[in-house]
Amino acid sequence: MSMSDKEAEELGKTMEQPSAENSLRAVFAACVATEMRAGKSQEEAVRVCHARIGKQLEDGVKAQSQATNVVPASGRGTSWFQRHLNWTYFLAWFFLATISGYLVMLAVGLVLDSLYPPPSPPEVAALGLTIILLAWTVGYIAVMIPVSIYVLRRKGRSLWWMLFIFSYIPVPMFLKNHRAVAEH
């Protein structure tokens, strides 16, 4: 029972309302008819068309999801940091930036105390404070700029929001995602 060009044409004409399913059936019927004209058996033509159209649909879905910035809702294929952007930002902000600042303060204080035991001149205190603030600022910026870029890009936000990292307020945590979430 083979499908001729006439039957494929009639199948396309008999579809009452245009829908994705009817369009797909018409494309499939046309593909089978073309393959059979090329000398393939009906089974072989159906198999070839099934593979070809399936691949095109899969590529189209991937392209559409990339074009609309759709990120998967499920945890498959994403790391913990990608699924929990606010926690990622908070952990970097609090532990890496804040705690590292206190550790730098402690280290500089211990070094200066060992070099200049109390009572030390006021210049040593000023030098220590300058070193602490400089090291803390450099460490904070070195940690928060890459983390802010990562979080803002994953949320689909402008990188101009990074200007708030200098206020020491974790503003990117309060921003909603602009990317759509795909339902599975």
Image (spheres, rainbow, N blue to C red):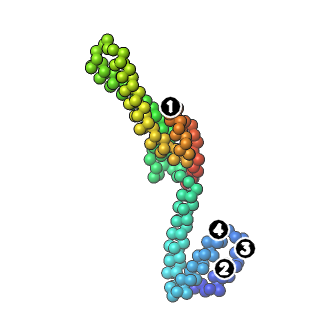
Q: Are marks 1 and 4 in contact (CB under 8 Å)?
A: no
Q: According to the image, label 3 marks what residue? A: 16
Query: Along the polypeptide, which appears first: circle 1 or circle 2?
Result: 2
**What amino acid type should be assigned to the residue bearing mark 1?**
Tyr
Q: According to the image, label 2 marks what residue? A: 11
How many labels were placed on the picture?
A: 4
C-alpha separation, residue under disc 1 versus residue under disc 2: 66 Å
Point out the residue furthest to the top here.
119
Q: According to the image, label 4 marks what residue? A: 20
Query: Along the polypeptide, which appears first: circle 3 or circle 1?
Result: 3
Q: Nearer the viewer, mark 1 or mark 2?
A: 1
C-alpha separation, residue under disc 1 versus residue under disc 4: 52 Å
Left or right, residue 127 beside residue 171 = left
**Residue drawn at x 46%, y 34% as measured from the top left:** 93
Point out the residue furthest to the right here.
16
Look at the image and tell me whether residue 173 can be seen: no
Q: Nearer the viewer, mark 4 or mark 3?
A: 4
**What amino acid type should be assigned to the residue bearing mark 3?**
Glu
Q: Residue 168 carries which label?
A: 1
